[in-house]
């Protein structure tokens, strides 16, 4: 951004940003407050990161992802097993497709 005019520095954008992204960046409104960017942690009231809040996020918000892996195991072994059944190939293929659709 140019400090004097408070506009985007097109030359700098052309040097560092893909040309197809420049119109998107230039369409962004520039803040009238002209304050510097800051970091904010959304999981505390004051916006400051604390180990306690990071631990809470890890235990509560990231936990659901881990549980999903346990509830939805891979079916790769079942698919491989479908081909070891002593049955006509058509039946093995049907079983494999049923497992695939799960």
Image: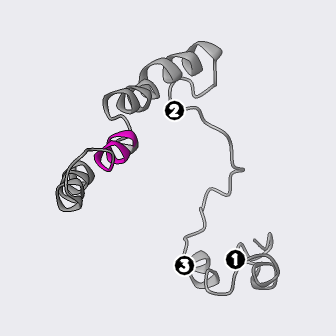
Tell me the mark number nearer the camera, choosing from 2 and 1: 2
Residue beneath the point at 82% across and 81% down: 15
Residue beneath the point at 42% across and 32% down: 65
Name the quadrant of the N terminus: bottom right
Helix, strand or loop at label 2? It is loop
Helix, strand or loop at label 3? It is loop
User: Where is mark 3, residue-wise?
Assistant: 27
Q: Is residue 5 visible?
A: yes
Up-down: is 23 above or below 41? below
Which numbered disc, 3 or 1, marks the residue that appears first in the sequence?
1
Mark number, residue 7: 1
Magenta stretch contains residue 57: no
Main SS category, magenta section: helix
Horizontal relation, residue 17 to residue 96: left or right: right
Helix, strand or loop at label 1? It is loop
Q: Which residues are magenta?
A: 77-83
Looking at the image, which is closer to me, 57 or 70? 70
Residue beneath the point at 55% across and 18% down: 53
Give coordinates of residue 93: x percent, y percent.
Answer: 23, 59
User: Where is mark 2, residue-wise?
Assistant: 42
Give coordinates of residue 87: x percent, y percent.
Answer: 20, 50
């Amino acid at each position: 951004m140019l400090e004097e005019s408070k506009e985007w520095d097109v030359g700098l954008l052309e040097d560092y940003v893909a040309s197809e992204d420049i119109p998107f960046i230039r369409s962004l409104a520039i803040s009238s407050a002209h304050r510097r960017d800051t970091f904010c942690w959304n999981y505390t009231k004051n916006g400051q990161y604390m180990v306690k809040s990071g631990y809470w996020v890890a235990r509560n918000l990231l936990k659901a992802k881990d549980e999903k892996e346990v509830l939805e195991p891979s079916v790769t072994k079942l698919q491989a097993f479908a081909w070891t059944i002593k049955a006509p190939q058509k039946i093995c293929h049907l079983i494999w497709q049923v497992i695939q659709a799960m």
